[in-house]
Image (tube, rainbow, N blue to C red):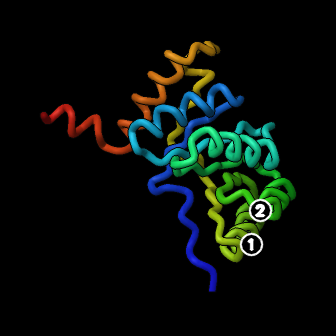
Amino acid sequence: MPAAPQFPPSPIRPILVRGLADALAAAAVADSAGAALTLMAPPAGGALWLLDLIARVRRAHPGLEVSGLLDCGDRAGEAQGALAAGVQALLFTGRTEAAGRLAAIATARGAALLTACPPLLDLAAESHGSTRPVLLEALCRDWLTQANGWAESRAEA
């Protein structure tokens, strides 16, 4: 029997990235903080794009626990293809019947299927389109510290 997958981290709080620069900024912060990282692909990103992005981040940060979440919208065929490609977490917002079938496939593959979008950090929206690494890293740092409860513990100190 295969081991249970380690990804995605729980609770899942992804960072929506639109390119390698976004992903590397998020990874640098997560790596320095010792935090797990979930990268979310935009709806048009696709499974292979996300898997390649994760592979590049892992090469740049080999000790980082990084996973991906693909937004498939209501496209069941895209979700099934993503599972076949090896994506470990999907967001599917289509019909309930299709979600049930996809959840069974995901479970059989050791993957996760979400039917509602979790809270996320949209780097492009929050940075107003900036690609400045300092700004992207600051946004990621704030997000990841909130995600791990560090903001609350620092406030109490």
The image position of residue 147, as x and y in percent, is: 40, 42
Answer with mark 2 or mark 1, whichever residue precedes in sequence.
Answer: 2
Q: Which mark is residue 96?
A: none
Residue 32 place in picture, x, y as percent:
42, 36
User: Would you call the spot at circle 2 few (<14 residues within 10 Å), some (14-19), or many (20 or more)?
Assistant: many
Image vertical order of residue 14 relative to residue 10, above or below: above
Location of residue 21 with respect to 157 vertically, above or below:
above
Q: Image quadrant for the C terminus?
A: top left
Q: Is residue 132 above or below residue 79?
A: above
Mark 2 residue type: Leu
12 relative position to 95: left or right: left
Residue 121: image x %, image y %?
A: 53, 33
Residue drawn at (67%, 52%) of the image: 91
Mark 2 or mark 1, which is nearer to you?
Answer: 2
- Looking at the image, which is closer to me, 133 or 75? 133
Secondary structure of residue under mark 1: helix
The vertical placement of 1 against 123, above or below, is below
Q: Which mark is residue 83?
A: 2
Check the image and name the residue furthest to the left: 157
Q: Position of residue 53 (x, y in %)?
A: 72, 40
Looking at the image, which residue is at 76% across and 44% down? 52
Helix, strand or loop for disc 2: helix
CB within 8 Å, label 2 to label 1: yes
Which residue shows up at 40% across the image and 28% down it? 142
**Residue at the spot 68% in from the left edge and 55% down from the top edge:** 90
The Cα–Cα distance between marks 2 and 1, rounded to whole angstroms, is 8 Å
| Amino acid on which disc 1 is placed | Ile
The numbered mark at residue 105 is 1
Q: Alpha-carbon neighbours of circle 1 within 10 Å: few (<14), some, or many (≥20)?
A: some
Q: In the image shown, does 46 or 62 lie closer to the viewer? A: 62
Left or right, 40 with reference to 77 = left
